[in-house]
Image: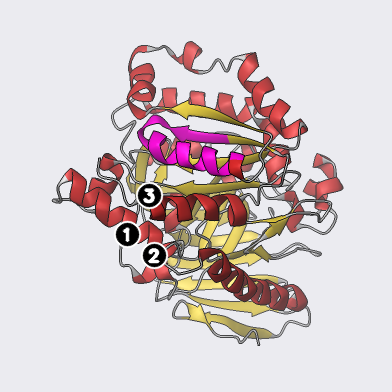
Amino acid sequence: MKMPSVEKLEKYAELALRTGVNLQDGQLLMINSTIAGAEFTKIVARKAFEMGAKDVHINWGDDELTRMKYEYADQETLSDVPEWQKQQYTYFAEQGAAILSIRSTDPDLLKGIDASKVAAATKARSEAMAKFRDYTMNDRIQWSIISIPIPKWAQKIFPGESEDRAVEKLWDQIFSIVRVDRENPVAAWEEHNQTLIKAREYLNKKQYQKLIYKAPGTDLEVALPEGHIWKGGPSKTVNGAVQFNPNMPTEEVFTAPHKYGVDGTVSSTKPLNYGGNVIDNFSLTFKEGKVVDFTAEEGSETLQHLLDTDEGSRRLGELALVAHESPISQSGLIFYNTLYDENASCHLALGKAYPNNMTGGSDMSADELDQHGVNDSLSHVDFMMGSGELDIDGVLADGTTEPVMRKGSWAISFE
């Protein structure tokens, strides 16, 4: 697999470490990566040590071995998460480590695998990682997700291209979208973060009671909890000491919807890659916050298993606003990768809400969060429903309705 220049890879690695997790001197770093990306991962590790990391621990994964296990292991084995794996993640979180995930997976990795196997394994891992997830979803530690190309993913995006050419084109897209192609990517991200901060501050002042979505196939009303907080761009650890960017790229501002206040129908606008399978052209119908009906042209069984994960997986845990003119949207590409596709389009998420999208939410019990309308679940799955045809209105506390987005673009000024 042809790789970009070492100079560009080093710029990407430094961006991930400085702007992504914002690694501190003397801090531990845990990297989740794939052996297909070993060359880049080694560059990241070396950069981390040069920046003063106390140690770098790498968890390697491999698509072929993952597929093999699903083909041959039974459901009971797939559902068994070894205690040492749980303890490993918890250990690094308790030590205050920064967590960097370098993701790159074949979108069709588990195509043809029994969907019940995939669902059982996914649920078991979600249960096993619940304690660790509490650290990330409440920003108790720094964490960030980036992506790098692998041939099967690249050729899914660029069908008909040779393996090397598809990978080369995907590297070019990634470098452009995450601003690695700029002279100073870190400075470019500082400027970009300020734009998202202005957007979230505007929305936090508005405190809309609900949002109304209208587009072809979508007619949805989503209530917002009292005291909801819009986030977007950089996050800060709970003590406010360290700023970091959880997602690279990111173009969204997002908050938690009221788990009992969602009514109507929403239709997807991009494929959803979930559990190694693609779900496409689907719609969800909500009543009092819960999915009561759905359709899907592709991946219906996978969607059914997702909705059946637990009670909370049929409710929304996130709504995110993304301008249709975002760089990812303007690329005209479908990435079959949620990190990228969600930042091309307004989206919603089924499942667990981020507690810190609620004032004081990080310190609330599960019952208190529920009383405030903040959803809980083992799952958190973003799906794209925005387009150049989406209109969104915001309803204020006095009942006044005003435009928030028109034809997928902001209808408000943040200046």
The quadrant of the rendering that contains the C terminus is: bottom right
Of pointers 1 and 3, the one earlier in the residue sequence: 3
Which residue is at a point 73% across and 48% down the rendered structure image? 139
Quarter of the rendering containing residue 210: bottom right
Q: Is residue 19 above or below residue 147?
A: below
Q: Position of residue 17 (x, y in %)?
A: 58, 49
Q: Is residue 253 above or below residue 58?
A: below
Q: Position of residue 371 (x, y in %)?
A: 82, 50
Name the main secondary structure of what is drawn in magenta: helix
Which residue is at a point 50% across and 55% down the rendered structure image? 285
Q: Position of residue 298 (x, y in %)?
A: 31, 45
Q: Residue furthest front?
A: 50
Q: Amino acid at mark 1?
A: Asp
The reply to whether residue 162 is in sight is: yes
Local secondary structure at mark 3: helix
Q: Amino acid at mark 3?
A: Val
For the residues bearing labels 1 and 2, Cβ distance under 8 angstroms: yes
Q: Residues within 10 Å of mark 1 (few under 14, many from 20)?
A: some
Q: Is residue 44 magenta?
A: yes
**Residue named by callout 3:** 6
**Residue named by callout 2:** 176
Quarter of the rendering containing residue 412: bottom right
Q: Viewed as shown, does residue 384 lie left or right of 413?
A: left
Q: Amino acid at mark 2?
A: Ser
Query: What segment carries the magenta color?
Result: 31-49
Which residue is at a point 53% across and 66% down the rendered structure image? 251
The reply to whether residue 334 is in sight is: no
74 or 159: which is nearer to us? 159
Local secondary structure at mark 2: helix
Q: Is residue 331 magenta?
A: no
**Residue named by callout 1:** 172
